[in-house]
Image (cartoon, helix red, strand yellow):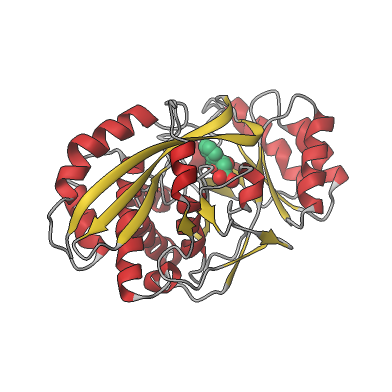
Amino acid sequence: MRVTQVDLFPVALPLVHEFETSSHRKASIEHILVRFTDESGECGWGEIASPSDPYYCAETVETAQLIAARYLRPLTLDYEWREPHELATRLNQVRGHEFAKAGFDIAAWDLFSRLRGVSLSKALGGTRSQVAAGVSLGIEPTIDALLGQIQHHVDGGYSRVKLKIKPGWDVEPVRAARAGFPNVLLHVDANGGYSPHRSSVDHLAKLDAFDLAMIEQPFAAREFVAHANLRQAIATPVCLDESIVDLGDLRTMIALDAGTVLNIKVSRMGGLTAALTAYELATAEGIAVWCGGMHEFGVGRAANIALCSLAGFDYPSDVSGSDKYYALDVIEPAVVAEAGVVQVPLGAGIGHDVIFSRVDQAKAGA
Ligand code: OSB
Ligand code: MG
């Protein structure tokens, strides 16, 4: 097939609840929706879920827009391909810029599965009709406010809660969360906020007391050795997020035994094609996998949900209902989580319709 038109739509939506990590705080999200149109007039949608600012990774919404318009769009237009991995290989001429590439790869998978009349889940090899959903909660001004947030989401049926931590906001909030919610599956995510020294290892070892499912990315992305040292020193499993951008990173993680869990993010790895390859290697090597999120709108979230429908995504993923993030998502029907479970759509492609009037209304900068 041949994509004859690529449209980029920057969209900004306010978050229902402000979100703070070890690096920054945000009240709204700006992503770029990607629309492919092929020669038959069929469309495929993708989402570039790059953070606006370079605090999670080096990409920003502006770099993503530039790379998409100047390099990825011309590489996509009028290129003949049969399967999404062919386009992904072509786009990999561009080094880095995984978030930008992910938006194009998701659009290719959506178009590909729509043309075949199958769901994205089925096209990817998914076998589950529903996936386990958790929530990721930011740093709050007080421990009471955090407990209120946990209560709200436990009341909403979620059985797994991830808490953001940073130096100065770790042992005490986690102790309070565990005391208040003895049966909730809990894990923590530091977004690389700790310095890679022995004192951090000793400090983080205190979290072993709280029966956490894992500690996610305590050190900076390239600190594989620090993660390997931590993994030796604590009982809580170590999970990597920012460290794993490509298969080479995953091989380093495995070789150094730098963690036992992988947070596969479609966006961070450059798309569904790359995520699938990482999934295959990780599961073959006994690394547990689950799917992380980047506060995606419904398009990117649908791609994440489809990925979670593959065997092995047992631990609940960061695929919450649309209402956890946005009052009005860009898709219909909205993503719904009930009793901690999201149904995998059966319709062709991502299985949701993009509501163009909402995309237009939420145009970034408008
Ligand atoms: O580290 O997983 C992360 C959001 C923005 C940047 C980094 C992360 C996150 C999340 C959100 O945790 C997860 C979600 O989309 O629900
Ligand atoms: Mg993370």
Q: Residue at x 56, y 47 (%)?
A: 329
- 134 to 97, vertically: above or below: below
Q: Position of residue 223 (x, y in %)?
A: 44, 34
Residue 90 falls left or right of residue 308? left
- In depth, the one of 195 and 265 nearer the eye is 265
Q: Quadrant of the N terminus?
A: bottom left
Q: Quadrant of the C terminus?
A: top left
Q: Position of residue 122 (x, y in %)?
A: 42, 74
Q: Position of residue 4 (x, y in %)?
A: 18, 54
Is residue 230 at least partly visible in the picture?
A: no
The number of discs equals 0
Q: Position of residue 176 (x, y in %)?
A: 83, 37
Q: Residue at x 84, y 48 (%)?
A: 181
- In depth, the one of 267 and 9 nearer the eye is 9
Residue 342 falls left or right of residue 111? right
Q: Residue at x 22, y 39 (%)?
A: 95
- In depth, the one of 188 and 236 nearer the eye is 188
Is residue 202 at least partly visible in the picture?
A: yes
Residue 313 falls left or right of residue 360? right
Write down the quadrant of residue 7 in the picture: top left
Q: Hey, which residue is sitting farthest front in the picture?
A: 357
Q: Hey, which residue is sitting farthest right in the picture?
A: 180
- 347 to 181, vertically: above or below: below
Q: Residue at x 55, y 25 (%)?
A: 23
